[in-house]
Amino acid sequence: MQSTPLSPRCVHKFGGASLADGERIRRVGELLFARAPDRPIAVVSAVEGVTTQLDQLAREAAAGAVDMARIRVRHRSLLAQLELDSEHLNRHFAELSTVLAAIRAAGELTQAQRDHVLSFGERASARIVAAHLSQRGLRAVPIDAYDLGLVTDSNHGRARVLPHSAERVRSALERIDAICVITGFVAADSHGRLTTLGRNGSDVSAALIGEAISAREVVFWKEVDGVMSADPKLVPNARRIAQLGYADARELTHLGANVLHPEAVEVLERCQLAGRVRCTRTPGDEGTLVRAGLEPREFLGVATRSNLALVRLRGAQDGDARQIAAHFASRAIDAQLVASDAGEFTFTAAASEALVRAAAQYARPLEVVREVATLAIADRRGLDAQLEQTLAAIGVEPLARWRSGASASLVFALPQARLSAAAGALHDVLQRALTPLGEAR
Ligand code: ASP
Ligand code: MG
């Protein structure tokens, strides 16, 4: 039936940091404008910081207080900066206010209500971006992913998209003759109840939409140059990785390089789809291409995580690890068992007051070490001894070490205050060990 065969399209995903102010949204508009003839499909996150604010708003409502001023001002200010109608999101604010009132009246927050509240972040940003494109003379429509047919299970807060969604999304998108600006992160279950895919889930939405339309490429636009060999804020001479195979991308994201969501990588790999991480500030640069058919690299980089705590039990028995994990899980704390040897179990978890409280409530004494960071070495050359020596030379004593990921990468837990020094020194050693031969890659 189709008259002219159309070339495969690209999906362009924009994270919250790329939508943080009017100037950045204009940059996003520019990127889409330049690609308009290729019928780009945009997937957007909420404006930076908004999801966290909405989460807080939902919890405050359950405790009896509703104050939408901050969230309203944030979005109104963006509309003003872009010279868009300040009333543009009023219908959404009215709906949000109704949901918050219901939560306050009930005095408690269900996971379904929380998802409903969180959905406003992406629903608002999609409307702002689409309105901006329209103002530039493009035909653009905001689309809530659930109206497109992105259907999930009913696991609120961490929903999984059901496989039959792909066909619906594909045919829905084929029928729309405009630039679609689709909400990331948000979907609905088969009863039409709003769900969310878990924090940072917009990457996953973009990959799934890419899968549905057999996209030529899924572009993850960021405010960094691509996938880097280390966090450039910690290691200024970190390098961009030009190309990554799926296994390497999986390894890096698993170890905590938070440039891409690990599940987005899984989706790309499942359908052998190309992904690319690019920077909105330097749109002429190649960024990092994630694709099939590449050999694993020897040195990927160092991946860091901050603001953690270590929880330890000494004199432990085999069954203790499961009991401790269950103890934290029942208090909604995600504690990962990272090491067990010589009767000692070590867990990592995000540092919080709730964690300290939960640890104190355990039947046996748990040691909690706070202000911890982890540094994972994604390198296949077995330079462990050199790394240990380097840490010793700069006077950093690891609090713990273990192995993680498919290639059993070495991970160090360190005092947070020493993370930057340690990351810089280890990255240097690994980078130097590459030359002159390794530079070829
Ligand atoms: N807005 C959601 C979050 O902040 C999803 C995303 O940004 O990908 O977690
Ligand atoms: Mg994000």
Image (cartoon, rainbow, N blue to C red):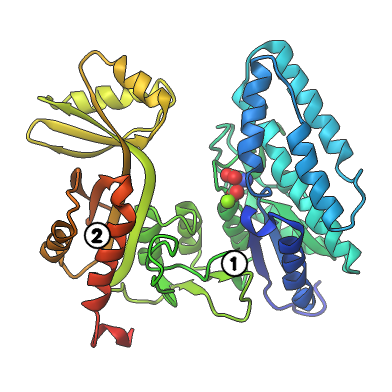
Q: Is residue 135 left or right of residue 226?
A: right
Q: In the figure, residue 321 lies in which quadrant?
A: top left
Residue 366 x, y percent position in the rendering: 23, 23
The residue located at (57%, 71%) in the rendering is 278
Q: Residues within 10 Å of mark 2 (few under 14, many from 20)?
A: few
Q: Earlier in the sequence, mark 1 or mark 2?
A: 1
Which residue corresponds to mark 1? 218
Residue 159 x, y percent position in the rendering: 56, 38
Q: Is residue 72 visible?
A: yes
Please tell me whether mark 2 sits on a helix, a strand or a loop.
Answer: loop
The CA span between labels 1 and 2 is 26 Å
The residue located at (49%, 73%) in the rendering is 288
Q: Residues within 10 Å of mark 1 (few under 14, many from 20)?
A: many
Q: In the figure, residue 116 lies in which quadrant?
A: top right
Badge number at residue 407: 2
For residue 316, above or below residue 222: above
Residue 294 x, y percent position in the rendering: 37, 76
Nearer the observer, 278 or 428: 428
The residue located at (63%, 71%) in the rendering is 281
